Image: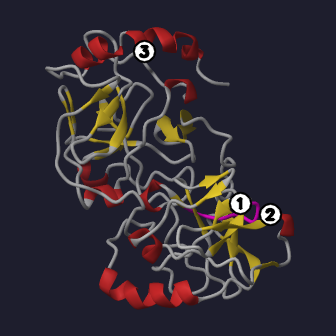
Amino acid sequence: MKTSWRSASLVVSAVAVAALTTACGSETAPPASSQNVGATAAAGDYGSGTGLGSGYDTGAAGQESAATQAATAGELAVSTNAELGEVLTDSAGMTLYRFDKDVAEPPKSNCDGECATKWPPVPADDATAGVGIDKNKLGSVTRTDGTKQLTIGGWPAYRFAKDTKAGDVNGQGVGGTWYALAPTGKKAQGGGAEAGDLPGLSTRKDSKLGEIVIDKNGHTVYRFMKDSPWPMKTACTGECLEKWPVIAPVDAEDTEGIDLKGSGPRGQGYVVFDRPDGIKQQTIDCVPIYTFAGDKKPGDTNGQGVGGTWFAIRPDGKPVGA
């Protein structure tokens, strides 16, 4: 069940410019419901590094990606990962992935150029369904270069150039947008909720941390104590964003259990932060929020307390244990 706030969303939109400006400490009104103050640095939308947040070595991975890109899919198979549950692989046992910024209906790939070097598209030509895979889930999409890419449940399929052997899942969670494929085309998440079951932002009860915020994939949401809400600024730029991907804007109606009022002078804290690096980031109580690339499955809290500056957050944006 979604938050009851959705009935008030139109009223909030009507006063967004004035209210958000005062609440988050900006001196001039930004467009619509955005804020723009803070840091400098850019991060690629397709993500870099591995699921554990290490840097992507373009020199070392060049040959890997070339070899991976040339490989055909063959008979697809289902393997079982201890953390992710059932994972879809190609005939060589290499994990297949999906990209959150792609589209499934109708299928469309948004990974080209350098992105497609790090995440080689899986050719559709010889792909067949193995045991445990519904052949009706297999399809194809024509890419911008005219090649046919395999789709699973409508989602374009990719390999990850940093996976060097069968069973590797180094691409899981990269950039907060790349996930191993389940045989159905959904995200492989072990015992977690199926993709689409959770709102964009909601909460869960953690046995150690209490009630904390989670994203649409069930992953823990964090804040950085070096960021500032008044006025809104961020100290996480460049390589920091590889380990701590930002939470993209989430409509207030797509939340459950989140404090949408905030503690600012006019009670408006649930706003979008227009970072100077061009990335739009969701905030709670004007605090920029992130996930952690080291959290590989729903329920992980590996980012809690990292460096004494990263902490899970409560529904009102307050840090847990700081």
- In percent of width and height, residue 230 lies at 19, 25
Three-letter code, disc 3: Ser
Task: Specify which label sits upstream in the sequence, 3 or 2.
Answer: 3
Q: Are marks 1 and 3 in contact (CB under 8 Å)?
A: no
The residue that label 2 is drawn on is 137
Closer-to-camera residue (46/166): 46
The residue that label 1 is drawn on is 185
Q: Is residue 142 visible?
A: yes
Mark nearer the viewer, 1 or 3? 3
Q: Are marks 2 and 1 in contact (CB under 8 Å)?
A: yes
Q: Please indicate whether residue 97 sits to the left or right of residue 150 in the image.
A: left
Three-letter code, disc 2: Lys
Structural crowding at the residue carrying mark 1, measured as other residues with C-alpha within 10 Å and reported as few (<14), some (14–19) or many (≥20): many
Q: Please indicate whether residue 314 sits to the left or right of residue 101 in the image.
A: left
Label 2 to label 1: alpha-carbon separation: 7 Å
The residue that label 3 is drawn on is 13
Which span is picked out in magenta? 179-184
